[in-house]
Structures are given as structure tokens and as C-alpha cells.
Image (cartoon, rainbow, N blue to C red):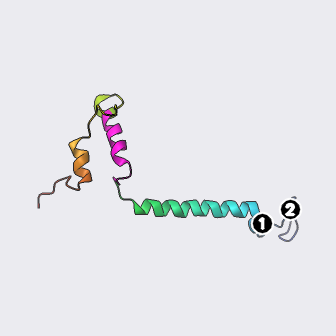
Amino acid sequence: MSASSPTRHGLTARGTWIRDPARALAVVQIAAIFVLGAVTVARFHIFAAVDERAHLAYVQEVAEHGRLPWLGRDYVSWQELAIEAHTYPRHSF
């Protein structure tokens, strides 16, 4: 089949995705998701104050005590508070 002969859907092989609006829309949406995701990742630093303390507290509780944390009963460790205050780890300069 040559490049100019129609395929079974009536489209030519060259530029098929441009002529198919649904496929072109899907490509644009995937590209937009990738770009917006990259921008979001670039904006937030590690341990951002979004909800990282809650995630770290959950993992720490499971790792240290082998159980799920309870709201109001379990505490936030001093390491987490120091990381958030940008005072951990201490550098001896």
C-alpha cells in the first residue's frame, strides 16, 4: 500500500493522527498533562508543606511501632518539626 492510498478507515498513512480529531485531541491532552505535571513538580520542593507532614508521620508510625497512627493520640516527631523549620540536619560549620 503506498503512502497516498487510503487505509481501511478512509485516511492516508501520512498525517493520519492530524486528520483524526479524536487522536489529535488525545495527543494534545496527554502533552498538556505531561507539561502541567512537570510544572507542578518543579514548583514544589521536597517536604513541601502541602501535606507531606501527614505522609511522613504515617510512614514513621508504621515503621517504628508497626501500627496505624490515630488522630489526636500520636505526635509529630521533633525531626519532622525541625525539617519543616529548616533546622535539620544541623550543620557544624
Whole-percent x and y of residue 76? 26, 40
Q: In which quadrant of the rendered view does residue 41 lie? A: bottom left
Q: Quadrant of the C terminus?
A: bottom left
Residue 50 among those drawn in magenta: yes
The span from disc 2 to disc 1 (Cα, nearest Å) is 10 Å
Instruction: Categorize mark 2 by other alpha carbons within 10 Å: few (<14), some (14-19), many (20+).
Output: few
Residue in the image at 74% along x and 68% along y:
18
| Left or right: where 31 falls relative to 4 | left
Q: Is the Cβ of the residue at disc 2 closer than 8 Å to that at disc 1?
A: yes
Instruction: Categorize mark 1 by other alpha carbons within 10 Å: few (<14), some (14-19), many (20+).
Output: some
Whole-percent x and y of residue 2? 85, 69
Residue in the image at 28% along x and 33% along y:
74
- Furthest-front residue in this view: 72
Q: Residue 7 has which mark?
A: 2
Answer above or below: position of 11 versus 65.
below
| Left or right: where 75 falls relative to 41 | left
Instruction: Find disc 1 in the rendering and name its residue.
Output: 16
Amino acid residing under circle 2: Thr
